Amino acid sequence: MADKANQVKTTEFRMSFPSLIKPRQRKNDNGAVSERYELTMLFPPGTNLTPLKAALRAAMVAKYGDDTKKWPRLKHGPAEVIRDFEAYNNNSDKPIAGDWKGWTIVRANATKYAPQVFAAQKDSSGRFPVVTDEREVYGGRWAKALLNAFTYARQDGKGVTFGLEMVQLLKRDKKFGGAVSAPEEVFDNASDEWAGNADAFDSGAQQSNATAEEEATW
């Protein structure tokens, strides 16, 4: 369970456009490039969103106090953090195919430190194996996460959002959202000739020599 009021351990969700092993480069309005780890979480219908909302509220209370009347106007508030995914997807330039009625989209990111990414079950030593293979992290796979809500203030306004601390990879599912395919899913075994397991090189060399002799007679 989360230890702080602004922390929340999520229930199961499907990942979309995850960058958890390596950071994604982003360019700001000034042209400066920054790196950050990102995760879009798609929660299925029936998910209890109260813990997520409570963590966002706790972050606001910690920053601005209990009196909500004294809170500043947010450009990016809870309504922008926790959104209806069906409506969002329908307005997207690259919508994800499927029936998304009742699904909820929430985003989280990390900048200074990479989130911990680990397997679904503990090993014989009682620890969760760390996942470093990018092929295991793809849009469509199920996961859980530990998030921490925090407030921020930028030139374009103030807001509240989620930071990304840990991700537990769960069962696999159909890929979507720019998933990285494993090479085994794309390519077939090469023939012995193309794999270099036959005498193709020698045959090729002999053929080249024969061709050279023919050209010399032209």
Image (cartoon, helix red, strand yellow):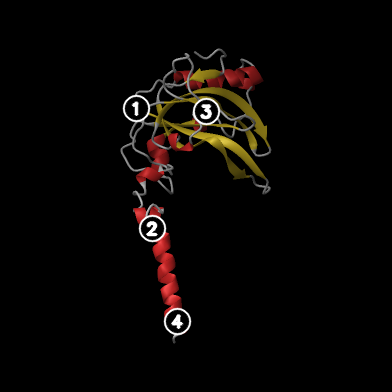
Q: Would residue 62 be seen by someone viewing this image from the given angle?
A: yes
Q: CA distance from mark 1 to mark 4?
A: 72 Å
Give coordinates of residue 183: x percent, y percent: 40, 45
Q: Nearer the viewer, residue 124 or 172?
A: 124
Residue with the mark numbered 2: 199
Disc 3 secondary structure class: helix
Q: Amino acid at mark 1?
A: Pro
Compared with 122, 13 (above or below) is below
Quadrant for residue 163, please give it: top right
Residue at image position (39%, 33%) is: 141
Judged from this view, the residue extending furthest toward the left is 99
For disc 2, the neighbor class at 10 Å (few under 14, some 14 to 19, many from 20) is few
Give coordinates of residue 52: x percent, y percent: 48, 22
Q: CA distance from mark 1 to mark 2?
A: 59 Å
Mark 3 and mark 2 lie on one chain; the one further toward the N terminus is 3
Disc 1 secondary structure class: loop
Q: Nearer the viewer, residue 176 or 192?
A: 192
Q: CA distance from mark 3 to mark 2?
A: 66 Å
Mark 4 and mark 3 lie on one chain; the one further toward the N terminus is 3
Residue with the mark numbered 3: 78
Mark 3 and mark 1 lie on one chain; the one further toward the N terminus is 1
Question: Do the numbered discs 3 and 2 sit on residues whose CB atoms are within 8 Å?
Answer: no
Residue at image position (42%, 22%) is: 120
Q: CA distance from mark 4 to mark 3?
A: 76 Å
